[in-house]
Amino acid sequence: MTPLSKKEVESHLESLEGWSYNEDAIHTTLEFNDFKDAFSAMTRIAFEAEAQQHHPNWFNVYSTLEISLSTHDAGGVTEKDFKMAKTIESIVSEN
């Protein structure tokens, strides 16, 4: 996969709320009611990530989940990252 240009990334970000681009990755921070809800979302995201063969970098403390997506093999952000981001948005919107 070929990394997207900064302009292409910024254009794709217009369709995602709460995501930003820096350090060759797209990032979001999600807030949940409590740890159980955050961990539940992480579990659901993990199954989808495995199905897409895309594994996010993430950090969780109590009810906050920080996620960063990039395609390591490509050295930047690709269409694969935006597919995963949309999957994450779908999972989170179901809560």
Image (tube, grey):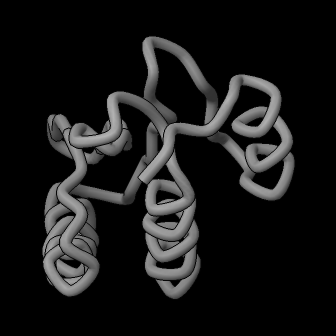
75 sits to left or right of 51 = right
With respect to residue 95, does 59 lie above or below? above
56 sits to left or right of 8 = left
Which residue is pictured at 77% across the width and 38% down the height?
8
Which residue is pictured at 73% across the width and 54% down the height?
16
With respect to residue 4, does 40 lie above or below? below
Which residue is pictured at 36% across the width and 39% down the height?
70
21 sits to left or right of 24 = right
Tell me which corner region of the image, top left, top right, bottom left or bottom right, holds residue 51: bottom left
Residue 35 placement (x, y as % from top left): 16, 56
Tell me which corner region of the image, top left, top right, bottom left or bottom right, holds residue 46: bottom left
Residue 72 placement (x, y as % from top left): 24, 38
Can residue 27 be seen here? no
Tell me which corner region of the image, top left, top right, bottom left or bottom right, holds residue 82: bottom right
In front of the other: 13 or 64: 13
Furthest residue in direction top, as rendered: 23
6 sits to left or right of 93 = right
In front of the other: 75 or 15: 75
Residue 57 placement (x, y as % from top left): 20, 40
Which residue is pictured at 48% across the width and 72% down the height?
92
Residue 81 placement (x, y as % from top left): 46, 55
